[in-house]
Amino acid sequence: MRTNSPLSRCLKFLGMFALIALAIGLNANIALAQTGADAASGPNAVFQLEGNTSTDGYVCFGITSTGPIIADAVAPGGGAPTCPSGTNLVTYAVPPTEDWDKIYSGKTVANATTGIVNDLFNSGSDDIYTGGSTKDTNDFGQWLWKNGKPQSKDDFEHGYAAAYARASDGHIIIVAGVDRYDNSGSSTAGFWFVQDPNIGTGVTTPTACTISSGCPFGGNHTDGDFLIISQFTVGGAVSTIQVFTWNGGASGSLNSTPNESGVQCDPRSGSEALCGTVNGGPVLSGGWAFTAKHTAGCNASGTGSGSVTANCMDTGEFLEVGLDLTGLFQGLGKPIPCISRFFAESRSSGTGLSSTLSDFIKPVNFPLCGISDTKTCTGAQIVNGNSVQYFFNGQINNTGIGTLSSVTVADTPGPLPNGDTVSNLVVCEPASTDQSGKNTCNANSVTAQTLTAKGTTGAMTTYNGSFIGDFDSSSIDNVATVSGTTPEGDVLTHSASWLVKGSSGCAPAVVGTLAITKSCSTGTGAVLSGSPLAVQVTYSGTVTNNANVTVSNITITDTPPADASSVSAITIACVSGCTNATNGSLTLAAGGSATYSGTFDTSTCTPVATGRCQFSDSVTASGTGALGAGTLSAPAFTATCLLCPFGSCPTQ
């Protein structure tokens, strides 16, 4: 086993960090339960706050007057793990606890996370703060930034944050961390968790500020924004960690005294609601690229001194904190804010709130409150031959940490082209397993209800509905928009859509086509003298729409013998489901039918028996199917007529 060198030497060049962390909870004075006896039993632990980045089953940890000690626990021959003098064995429940390596790999169970946020370092193109008004005590509207190179001890390389719902009590624990380029001096670091989504939008990507006096940072404060700062001495011990809240909006102020104070994290007991820790020896990053100004060597296991130099953070170059904000907000008597953005900052000197700021990690999304929905087409059917009834369902999810009230959903088919319309739009809740019952609701919304925080019972509900449209489109979106109200009264929305046809495959199939029959006869006395014979033929039949859509502009075409003359126009009469009973304009509803008739003269007759001959012709029908079905045609029907000039024909 490799242990750390004497702490006084290991921490000789330890620089100062400050770190902000924010966490949201529901009850006061509950410890982070980051490790130790609490974590061994599992239910209270959420994160490993011990000063390294790897998810461990166990580590050795101790605290001296100059700072923390951490080392790998060794289990010789597969026996019980042992620890060096001055440290104690800390056993984690894995899962549910995890560390920053899980955040980096994306295999985290966190409710919200920033991932590992990169920042330029050791570069004149880095983004840094400037201007005398860029202080934590002033609103963001007064902050300025520019391109520049901070002091190496204040130069951040990465920042990170995550939020967890603790299963034992529903508390939301937020952890945050930062690593820096150089550990050769004192520094102060902090993290802001803010609500305005416009915070930091003035920092362009790629970073470029061409105004010599500095460019606007962007955004404004909202009541309930949080700042946590932590000062460290050159000796390496964690000094007081403090949490401050912003009161009011852009014209408000930061508390002059901390709302809560914390101490060094002690994973052996896990009894603090607010704590922070710096790495008391070299540790490997959680997988992300890291460069130290002064080369250090890490143990290949990730914790302790060794020969691995790649991605090795020297003592005092990594800091992490954790906070349970339950007691904080209960004490303030305020609702828990829905944080949307996160960023880290450093200070070149001084520990006061009014100190000039230095480097910063660009604000990134950190959505602690959120709502989402899904939408799926569950079926479709053709109605009355010219409309489609679509059925849908979906889920509404609380994706954040706070309870959402007044949760509703509304459905919006469209936008609709070409004058298409929608009718009978309904949305119902909860989802019915009986599809026929999905159009029995009266209102286009789910009854307002409450959704609890993500990861708890009641964080999801379902909805369903249907609508009838006079279209069958491959490009029209159908959008379901959900909304919910946060504890502080902000309304969150989210939309989900599916294509009515296209990629969703939700479109009824057009089946069937037109069908036609025909019969014919020769009129008595129509036999003329001479040779060849000239005969008048009368034909008639029925055209039927056997498709499941309306067919319009139906044309019936008869094809008599080549020598036909005196050909009459085709006459059409409705039987059922028929309109515009004129050839070329005929419309038949699904199942509708009409009769037709006509005459022509012909002298073509093929002998088939003594005193008898026959001739034949064909008839077809075609029209345009509704809902984009295209041309529907009846197969050609050929009728045969017998001519019996010496008397009636005994058979046909």
Image (cartoon, helix red, strand yellow):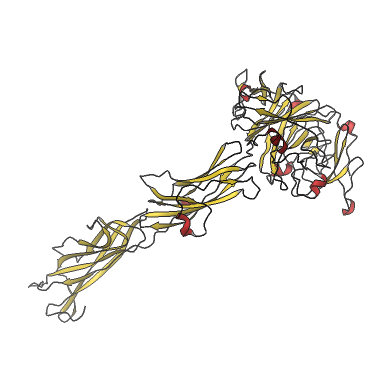
Q: Residue lying farthest right?
A: 85
Q: Is residue 421 left or right of residue 588?
A: right
Whether residue 488 is visible here, answered yes or no, is yes
Q: Quadrant of residue 176?
A: top right
Q: Is residue 569 left or right of residue 289?
A: left
Tell me residue 374's x, y (percent). Answer: 54, 48
Image vertical order of residue 642 relative to residue 231, above or below: below
Image vertical order of residue 272 relative to residue 433, above or below: above
Q: Is residue 476 left or right of residue 308?
A: left
Residue located 77% across and 22% down the image:
350
Tell me residue 485's x, y (percent). Answer: 57, 40
Residue located 62% across and 17% down the image:
213
Q: Quadrant of the N terminus?
A: top right
Q: Nearer the viewer, residue 633 or 193?
A: 193
Q: Quadrant of residue 298?
A: top right
Residue located 46% across and 47% down the image:
444
Whether residue 473 is visible here, answered yes or no, is no
Residue located 80% across and 44% down the image:
35
Tell me residue 30's x, y (percent). Answer: 76, 41
Q: Is residue 368 left or right of residue 596?
A: right
Image vertical order of residue 45 relative to residue 21, above or below: below
Q: Quadrant of the C terminus?
A: bottom left
How many badges with numbers are in the image? 0
